[in-house]
Amino acid sequence: MAIWWRGLRSAAEVANLPAFSIGRSIRCLHQYETIQAIPREATGRRVAARDRTIGRIPAVVFTQSLLETDASKRDVSRKQLLTADRKQIKSIVDSVGLPFFCSTTFKLQIRAGQGSSSLVESGRVLPLKIHRDEESGKILNLVFVWANDGELLKVDVPLVFKGLDHCPGLKKGGNLRSMRSTLKLVGPAEHMPSKIEVDVSKLDIEDKVLMQEVEFHSSLKLLSKNETLPVCKIVATSPVKEPEAVQA
């Protein structure tokens, strides 16, 4: 069995991430931010299986506009079939954190062949999907889109809640209820964040943060039919019911 990941699967994956792990991810990112890849000529299950046995991950990179259902909106595709080094990709995913991998852009260098110094093409890319084995967790395939400056991207950006230690509602015994784990944004690649921080430090019991109140770069647009929906809320803890006395 295998599964495709596109960002987060649940709100808990962001809400429960310790702050130190997010900081560690950002600090380690610079070590692995340039993905090294080489072209692949053939496709198919046997070819992909052979690549994986020698430590390569089959991948593809193209412009995101290629996914548009309206053909008139599609740009000339820069679709390329690649393979990437499995150890390097694993290091990047471990450093950035799987929830943030599909919302973080990376440098990509396509070399003429393994061990070659000849550069075929380079640029920034955004992981669109990551295909993993459900049992072992091994990465099987990767899908990237070009994310150079000026490229228009649609991204499900993870939400990270900050200010929990200072939240009045939590200090009174309330709980943080997360209604959304991501927000879908569209805008230029250079302004697309890998995560959006939502400040809950001033929320009391029953207070909430609406989608339209979340802050991000002015060049980005929120893709939602109803921006008044909440992303989180502080709820009161349900009182424990005392057992009813049994009459003799």
Image (tube, rainbow, N blue to C red):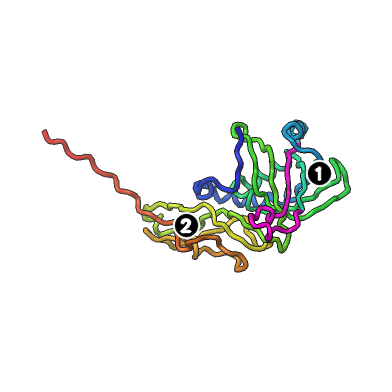
In the rendered image, which quarter is residue 185 located in? bottom right
Say if mark 1 contacts mark 2, CB within 8 Å.
no
| Residue placed most toward the observer, 139 or 19 | 139
Q: Secondary structure at mark 2?
A: strand
Residue 174 makes an appearance in the image: yes
For badge 1, the amino acid type reads Pro
Query: Is 64 in the magenta?
Result: yes
Outermost residue toward the left in this view: 248
Q: Secondary structure at mark 1?
A: strand
For badge 2, the amino acid type reads Val
State the residue at coordinates (74%, 35%). Answer: 44
| Residue placed most toward the observer, 205 or 231 | 231
Query: Is 15 in the magenta?
Result: no
Q: CA distance from mark 1 to mark 2?
A: 42 Å
On the picture, is 41 further left or further right than 212?
right
- Vertical placement of residue 189 versus 95, above or below: below
In the rendered image, which quarter is residue 58 located in? top right
Residue picked out by circle 1: 39
Badge 2, how many Cα within 10 Å: few under 14, some, many 20+? Answer: many
Residue 24 makes an appearance in the image: no
User: Quadrant of the image for the N terminus?
Assistant: top right
Which-is-in-front pick, marks 1 and 2? 1
Give the mark nearer the N terminus: 1 vs 2. 1
Residue picked out by circle 2: 231
The magenta span reads 56-77
Q: Give residue 196's position: percent from left, percent from top.
A: 57, 58
Q: Give residue 146's position: percent from left, percent from top.
A: 72, 54
| Residue placed most toward the observer, 219 or 244 | 219
Count the marks: 2
In the rendered image, which quarter is residue 233 located in? bottom left
Q: Give residue 8's position: percent from left, percent from top.
A: 56, 47
State the residue at coordinates (63%, 38%). Answer: 132
